[in-house]
Amino acid sequence: MEQMKKRLFYGIAITLLILIGITIGGSFFMLNFSLKPHNRGKDIQSSYEYMYQAYPYLKPWVDSLNTVSALKDTFIHANDGTRLHAFYIAANRPTDKTAVIVHGYTDNAIRMFMIGYLYNHDFNYNILLPDLRNTGLSDGDYIQMGWRDRFDVLQWMDIANRIYGDSTQMVVHGISMGAATTMMVSGEQPQPGYVKCYVEDCGYTSVWDEFSYQLKDMFHLPPCPLMYSTNALCRFEYGWDFKEASAVKQVAKCLLPMLFIHGDADTYVPTWMVYELYKAKPEPKELWIVPGATHAMSYRDDTEEYVNKVRLFVDKYIK
């Protein structure tokens, strides 16, 4: 009997050790899979090729900008010393209207040129498009999912304001992870006086919610235990966790106007998230659900209406 108890004890102990080992190994895999993925945003040439194919009018626009050296680069150093890059383009006619445009997960500034075109070509805005960390021409060891990026974007907003005359009227417009970043920026207080409004297109409620959704969708796994262990590992490795990286909590503190855009066929950042975000945000706010649009494709799928919706929104607050 005693021998059987020992065998049972050792069997349970070994099983627990195996499960703990699998969980720890899985946590390292998930963290690297999420924050250090294969990153198309580092491939500059293929980014140009993709954008010119998807949006053919961009190539003559970019060529015309390059002809007169209007497409400019700038580099700065973040507070921790990381070297960061952005493109900036002045409006064709002098103006104080300015847009800072923030790209999504494994994208880069180039892959937001269609929104740059919207503001610069269609609206006559000055624009600045940063490469977030570990993408484009910016340095950095991992993708920050917008949470730590909010400090970099605030720095870029100040740079844009100084480039364009120190008295701009600014909108910040982000798509996907860039939209989450935009919302995370919007909750920082106090807000710079030159910022007048925000546009978020298909951002997630929080990193925890998005990763939990993807864990179930891609790997058919529940949040427990892997989300909890990976979250703890992220805090240990990088000093922040998935739950604190919450766009919902940030927009709840935002008193500036915000336009929420989301496709009703989005299965990557599911459409239900935008309703939670919209509910959390105090007035003034607007919501546009785009029929049939999949993730980050609202502009491509309904360009004319997208331009009209954004124009009507920003014109209310930027005169």
Image (spheres, rainbow, N blue to C red):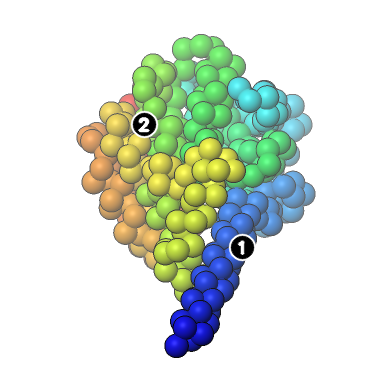
- Residue at 49% across, 49% down: 232
- Residue at 35% across, 36% down: 250
Q: Which mark is residue 244?
A: none
Numbered marks: total? 2
Query: Residue at label 2?
Result: 187
Q: Looking at the image, can residue 180 be seen?
A: no
Front position in the image: 17 or 306: 17
| Structural distance between the alpha carbons of marks 2 and 1 | 35 Å
Front position in the image: 78 or 155: 78
Q: Position of residue 236 (x, y in %)?
A: 55, 43
Q: Position of residue 319 (x, y in %)?
A: 36, 22
**Mark toward the start of the polypeptide (2 vs 1):** 1
Q: Secondary structure at mark 2?
A: loop
The amino acid sitting under disc 2 is Gly
Residue 225 sits in which quadrant?
Answer: bottom left
Q: Position of residue 275 (x, y in %)?
A: 28, 53
Query: Residue at label 1?
Result: 25
Give neighbour class at mark 2: few <14, some 14-19, many 20+ (Cα, 10 Å): many
Decide if residue 53 is on the left or right side of residue 119. right
Q: Looking at the image, can residue 79 be seen?
A: yes
Residue 189 sits in which quadrant?
Answer: top left
Q: Position of residue 32 (x, y in %)?
A: 63, 55
- Does residue 4 lie above or below 59 as drawn? below
- Residue at 61% across, 38% down: 132
Give neighbour class at mark 1: few <14, some 14-19, many 20+ (Cα, 10 Å): some
Q: Secondary structure at mark 1?
A: helix
- Residue at 74% across, 27% down: 69
Front position in the image: 116 or 86: 86
